[in-house]
Amino acid sequence: MSRIERTFNALKEKGEKALVGFVTAGDPNPEMSMELIRAMCRAGVDILELGIPFSDPTADGPLIQRSSSRALAANVSLDTVLEITARLRNETDVPIILFSYYNPIHAFGTEKFYGKAQAAGADGVLVVDLPPEESDEMTGCWNGGTFCLIRLIAPTTPQPRMKMIAGEAGGFLYMVSKTGVTGSAGLDVSQAQVNIEHLKKITSLPICVGFGVSTAADVSALAAVADGVVIGSAFEKLIEENLEDSDLVTVMEEKVREFKSATRVSR
């Protein structure tokens, strides 16, 4: 059984939903990034998404774009992200998903990436701009282990395509709550709930919802119907607004605890 599956099973037993926390690895620099991620784990993040910095993150809004720029300015590369992953794996059993665009993986080498990501202790990868029809180029060298390709489903995805994507996915499904980029305003919780219910009819995989989730109230409302809630831009906003604050790590820990509390639902 994979770490991801064990995590969702344990949360179900406790009457909780998963808090999936995204940060760009290496933002604002590798050592501070490690401290922030450790704080997130201490405070209750159930699954980590570590963003691989990229110069053209087209699906991301300004906050995550700037976080990538800060990490790149600190010379963070895919190798650096894998080193961070390996250090974390020596300290925590929290599942780690690498979040990337395809260009960095393709340039690194897909087979090399697969081997090094597994060796570092990553549990899967989410590739924002790799459609299912093209993903064999990356997954063709995979050996059928527990390393997962996390698939995205958009609110505009028709049901037959949802079924096709879900049938090829592993770990969990990432339901995008709305059209647009990460961090943009206009989260429609009621519509997201409808989309989740539709997806639940065609898959038994856990469903995590993200994009535009910024408050504990958002988390609570989505946790009522989803298996997990993904938060990224809100964490990157916190980092950006507190770059010069010596208490940044404590601020991050408190924010994670607030969001995690909102994932606890009645049995």
Image (cartoon, rainbow, N blue to C red):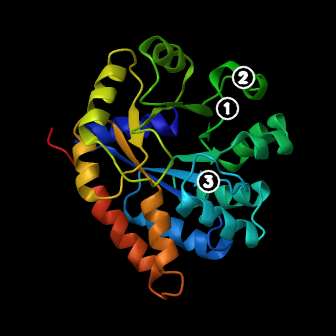
What's the distance in space between the residues labelled 3 and 2, CA to CA?
21 Å
From the viewer's perspective, is the residue at label 1 or at label 3 nearer?
1
Is residue 262 visible in this depiction of the protein? no
Rendering coords of residue 125 (x, y %):
62, 39
Residue flagged by tag 3: what amino acid is it?
Answer: Gly
Q: Indicate which disc, 1 or 3, sits on the residue closer to the N terminus.
A: 3
- Decide: few, some or many residues near mark 2? Use Cα within 10 Å; few <14, some 14-19, many ≥20: few
Picture quadrant of residue 9? top left
Residue at numbered disc 1: 130
Residue at numbered disc 2: 134
Q: Do callouts 1 and 2 mark residues in contact (Cβ within 8 Å)?
A: yes
Nearest to the observer: residue 247 or residue 181: 181
The kind of secondary structure element at disc 3 is strand
Picture quadrant of residue 18? top left
Residue at the spot 14% in from the left edge and 42% down from the top edge = 266
Rendering coords of residue 128 (x, y %):
61, 39
Residue flagged by tag 2: what amino acid is it?
Answer: Glu
Residue at the spot 29% in from the left edge and 59% down from the top edge = 215
What's the distance in space between the residues labelled 1 and 3, CA to CA?
15 Å
What's the distance in space between the residues labelled 1 and 2, CA to CA?
6 Å
Is residue 168 visible in this depiction of the protein? yes
The kind of secondary structure element at disc 1 is loop
Residue at numbered disc 3: 51
Q: Can you tell which mark lies on residue 14?
A: none
